[in-house]
Each structure stands twice: as C-alpha cells, then as structure tokens.
Amino acid sequence: MEKASSRPIWSGSISFGLVTIPVRLFTAVREKRLHFRTLHDQDKVPLKQKMYCPADGKEVHPEHTVKGYEIEKDRFVVVRQDELDAARPKGTKAIEIQDFVELDEIDPLFFDRPYYVAPKPEGAKPYKLLLEAMEKTKKVGIAKVVMWNKEYLAALRPLDGALVLETMHFNDEVIKPDTVAGLEVKAKVDDRELKMATQLIDSLSTDFEPQKYKDEYREQVMEIIERKAAGEEIHTAPTREEKGAGRATNLMAALEASLAKSRGGGGGGGGGANGHRARATATAARSTRRRKSA
C-alpha cells in the first residue's frame, strides 16, 4: 500500500549549532477543495482567458508584459526580472534553527502550513537525537528556510514521534487586533450572565475528535456530481426556512435556553451534556489515577 505522502516536496538539511541532519519534507495536509472550470454553456467547452490592455482594447501577448508594483492607485514602479533574481534569497537548502522557544508562546495566528520532516538514511541518528531532546525540553525550534525561491519563517516541533515543520507568517504580516475596527467592545457583562455562559461552555466541553467534524457542503456537492456523472437526473427541491422557536432577543434568555437544551442532550450524536459530562468525569478520573500512581 502506497503511503499518503510518498514523494518529498523538498530536500535539504536541519542545521543547529554545528550539527547537520539530512532531511526531506513531505506534505502534511491535503486540502480537499471543490474546483470548477468555467464552460461555454452551449458546447460545454472550457473557456480561456486572454490578457488585454483596457487603454486600447487590444490583446497583449506575454512577451510584451512587465512586472509593476503599485505604490498608489494607478502609479506603478516597474521591476525587471534580473533585479528580482538578484534580490532572491540564496538557496542554502538548510532549515537553520535560530532559537528554541516554548510552543505556548507562539500564537496560532502565526502558523501557516505544516510539513512532515523525515530523515534521510544517513541522518537517522542525529534526527532521533534532536527529536528526543525537543520532546524532553518541550521546546520548539524557530528557523528560517528557503524553498521555491522564497524565504520562510518556520517552527520545527515534535509531533507523535516525528518532527513537523510549520511555515509561519512574519510579524509584520500579522494584523494586530488593536488596529481592527470594531474589536474594541465596551459592553459590560454581569456576574449572572458570565456564570451562565461558563456553565454552557462546561456542558459542551469534550475531548477534541477531529474525525467527527465533516465538510458537509463538499460531501453533498460531490454526491450530486457522482450521481450526475452516473447519468442520474438530479432534481433539488427549493429550500424553505424551518419554522421553529424564534431567536431569543434577551441574552440571559438565550443562555438559559441553550443551557437547558444542552442538559437535555438536544445536540444529538452523543454530544449533549450527559455525554460531555461523562467524558469529562472519565478524564478527571484518569488524571487522578495517574497522579496517585505517580
């Protein structure tokens, strides 16, 4: 059986101090997005886009294009390809660890895309050494790496007996909340509302089980596509708004109704309060036993 990620997407080494570890990167996430082509409605042939100049309405061929950076509306600085080539980072083919930090110090906003890091045969021992040292110290390596002519900031961390490299956003790419309009909330919350909201969160708390969360829209669209590809004619009834209890306009009433529904197991699928509390009790019991055995 072929492994999910059988081909490396990058090959190089991990460098920290004077230690060099030959490694390869493998894709850790494959996004399952729906991709549609735009077709001509009469003959169902995929359409092609052409570049044209709006100033004279003529089609422009690729050999007559240049790169321009817009410094303000309709004002551009033209940059030649040789200038871009000269500014490109030098490809060292190394994941250069610069610092080790606590994982909790990195806000998830900084993370971008993960890759599995596998050792080449000659790098197995130093790879295992770095992995176990990072697991023991609970540290994450902050590194820089050049891939595909671009310099990336990255976090190297242990995960389930392997190393994962997660590319990161640079600090000046992350928007600070105090610069976002509308995030400054001046409303006051009273103790009763806070207590009720806390109880609601507690009643819905459980262990994270990623397999239970599905992309239902994508699954439904793929089902339609598969049925139509098999020659079945699809007729979809128009959607109607379900009549039910109106939305509570009072915050306290909404919290009370939500808490009552949670306690009654209205969430379905074992996700009600009873299921959550049972799992929470079991987890607490396991933690107690571990502390006693320690």
Image (tube, helix red, strand yellow):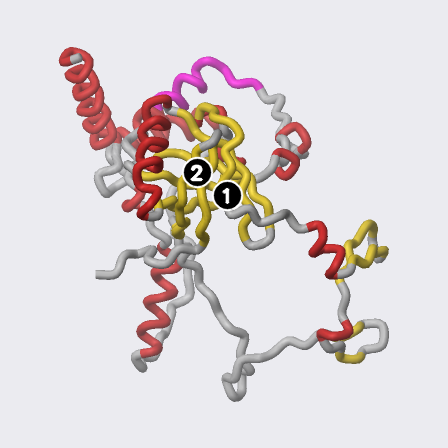
**211 in relation to 125, above or below:** below
Q: Residue at x 40, y 27 (%)?
A: 255
Q: Residue at x 40, y 58 (%)?
A: 32
Name the magenta segment's main secondary structure.
helix
Closest to the observer: 294 or 179?
A: 294
Closest to the observer: 240 or 82?
A: 82
According to the image, label 2 marks what residue? 20
Q: Which residues are magenta?
A: 188-199
Q: Amino acid at mark 2?
A: Thr
Residue 253 seen by the camera: no
Q: Position of residue 223 (x, y in %)?
A: 32, 67
Question: Left or right: 127 with respect to 141?
Answer: left
- Quarter holding the C terminus is top left
According to the image, label 1 marks what residue? 94
Q: Amino acid at mark 1?
A: Ala
Label 1–label 2 contact, CB within 8 A: yes
Q: Residue at x 38, y 65 (%)?
A: 221
* Residue 179 colored in magenta in the image: no
Q: Position of residue 269 (x, y in %)?
A: 23, 43
Residue 84 seen by the camera: yes
Q: Quadrant of residue 5?
A: bottom left
Element under disc 1: strand
- Quarter holding the N terminus is bottom left
Closest to the observer: 30 or 242?
A: 30
Dot 2: within a 10 Å radius of its alpha carbon, few (fewer than 14), some, or many (20 or more) residues? Answer: some
Q: Position of residue 21 (x, y in %)?
A: 40, 40
